[in-house]
Image (cartoon, rainbow, N blue to C red):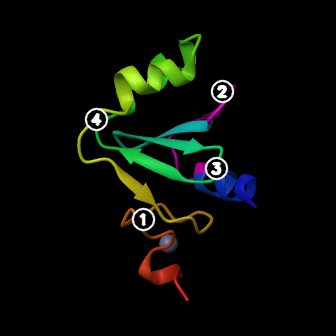
Amino acid sequence: MVLRSIIQDSEKCLEFSKVESSNIAAVGVLGSDLIVWFKGGVAYIYPEGSEHYRGILASDSKGTYFHQKIKKIPNCGKLCSSAGCLKRVAYQSNRCLDHSF
Ligand SMILES: [Zn+2]
């Protein structure tokens, strides 16, 4: 189910790649933003973070690169967990208003 969500999400991205990491499942570019999908099934968006797409793919440790360069990007947000929906949600929510029931 998590995998299906990532694949549908990825269709909206300019670039997308699964990665080998203990906690990160995939990264993608949406406009100028960077999206990181975590193995727990949650995805976060990092505004103006697309410049780090090549960097994290090239890094030996995705987790280290994430903690040093991406995690500190301001105004990041959690994304709706519904497949293919890339709307931001509150941190305590899993789905946006369109997909909550
Ligand atoms: Zn949604």
Q: Which amino acid does label 4 sit on?
A: Ile
Measure the alpha-carbon separation of dots 4 and 3: 21 Å
State the residue position of label 2. Answer: 21
Camera-side mark, 4 or 1: 4
Q: Residue at x 67, y 59 (%)?
A: 5
In contact (CB < 8 Å): disc 4 and disc 1 = no
Say which label, 4 or 1, has the lower sequence index: 4
Q: Which amino acid does label 1 sit on?
A: Lys
SS label for mark 3: loop
Say which label, 2 or 4, has the lower sequence index: 2
In contact (CB < 8 Å): disc 4 and disc 3 = no
Image disc number at residue 73:
4
Q: What residue type is labelled 2?
A: Ser
State the residue position of label 1. Answer: 87
**Could you say which quadrant of the image residue 60 lies in?**
top right
The residues colored magenta run 10-23
Task: Report if the beta carbon of the residue with label 1 is closer than 8 angstroms to ligand 1.
Answer: yes
